[in-house]
Amino acid sequence: MSTQRHLDPHCQAILQEYKDNLPQFRKIETRVRNDIKRTLDDAGLLVAAIESRVKGYDSLAGKLELKGNKYNSLADLTDIIGLRVITFYIDDVDKVASAVERLFTIDWENSVDKRKIHEIDSFGYLSLHYICSVPDFPYRFEIQMRTLLQHAWANMDHDTGYKSGVEIPKRYMRNMSRLAGMLELVDDEFSKIRIELTDYRRRVQALVRSGNLDEVPIDGDTFRSYLELNPFSQLNKRIASMNQAEIQDVPLMPYLAVFKGIGLKTLGDIARIIKEYSEGAYQIACYQIGLTDLDIISSSIGPQDLCIAYILKNGGGKAGIKNMFDLLNGDNESNEMIAEMLLEQSKDLPFMYSRN
Amino acid sequence: MEVKINTQDNVTTAQLTGRLDTPASQEVSGDFDNLMQYAAGTVILDCTELEYISSSGLRLFLSLRKAAASKGGKVIVKAINKDIRSVFMMTGFLNLFEIQD
């Protein structure tokens, strides 16, 4: 419900102009938000949120009541349309800013990088504000860009009822400054971790490509890079050729836990298992599907049978096999039945008796 | 081979009865096509009365799983017998499905 306000004719004219243009404001709000979203998506830049709103009638009337004489016309108000892009990382604020610069015309005179205008004795953890425009629309709009932590700060700061430290009692100032400093530090640390992780992934990918697998420890990133080399493809094709079977690609990441569970430490260890146990894995597959008409297998058949061959050959027995299927399928009694069956089958397989 | 479909809330249960061999897979492929429309939710393939599954049957299960994965749903394979479990294991599909006893 609208609040009764005492506005002079000048302010009432501005309000009327706002009402007349409201559908257009909403249209531009949607267009700008979609443009930003599409550009960030195309750049592969993941953000926490893109928010937008058109200023409400009451909010504008309240603003005009307080300082209406400051504005000659509606075009002087730059926040009728407001958008906010909230990023996960501090470096992404600049990336978003550069996307916004490319998309819209920036009114540099009125845009503020509040991150750079900190007084040494002020408190706060502020964001980047651009005043923008598009060619076919006479009104400007505001885009705020900030990290999640800057966003958290802005909301908490707002809740204290103080703005930019102007009126804050000195005894609280120190604690607020400490908190702002801590958030800034956390944002910086998150960024550093991301940079280090990206660097680690690049180094690991280079090692995997160069074949120095013994130097690469097994973890989620390294195993994923290794899978890109299709290390089980040859074995899968050999198994499939038995029944001219079709191979269905399935995710192999669950085998990370299995390889670690059987004690492998590096990608070199996996490569050795492929080399030394492929024959055993093939014999297991032959025994199981060679005399059936099953003509579809999954791409996990290779790693599965390799692990079975490795466990059985190294004395892991029924418990070792059950543990493997527990890691893959969750702990259940049926895994014990499968383990028993595999143990029994293995007694007929030559690889169990070879010196290897 | 018989497929009885029952939907309640966001969960669809298909009770499979008989042997899902190649001719039967063709026979019930329409029922599996029907199940696709529920793939955004949870689909339970109740195999309590399912005696056997062939490659063609596996393909029906896989198509349904693929549809569920693309729509954000899931397929639960319930109460498979020892032989069918072995088929899932031997073909490497055991860990692809959520299997409930």
Image: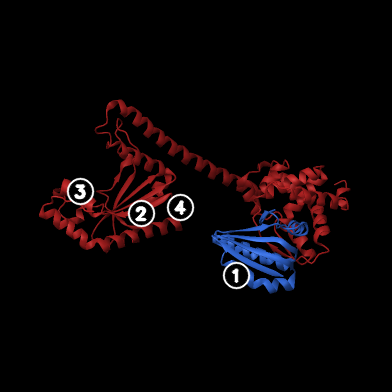
Chain colours: A red, B blue
Q: Which residue is mark 2?
A: A100
Q: Nearer the viewer, mark 4 or mark 1?
A: 1
> Quick one: label 2, few (<14), some, or many (20+) residues within 10 Å?
many
The three-letter code of the residue at mark 2 reads Val
The three-letter code of the residue at mark 3 reads Lys
Spatial CA distance of label 3 from label 4 is: 35 Å
The three-letter code of the residue at mark 4 reads Leu
Spatial CA distance of label 4 from label 1 is: 39 Å
In the image, residue A267 lies at what x, y percent?
69, 45
**Residue A245 in which image quadrant:** bottom right
Spatial CA distance of label 3 from label 2 is: 27 Å
In the image, residue A87 lies at what x, y percent?
42, 47
In the image, residue A78 lies at what x, y percent?
24, 52
Q: Are dots 1 and 2 on a single chain?
A: no
In the image, residue A143 lies at what x, y percent?
32, 51
Residue A42 marker: none
- Dot 2 falls on a residue whose secondary structure is helix
Q: Which residue is mark 3?
A: A63
Sequence-wise, the earlier of marks 3 and 2 is: 3
Q: Which residue is mark 1?
A: B34
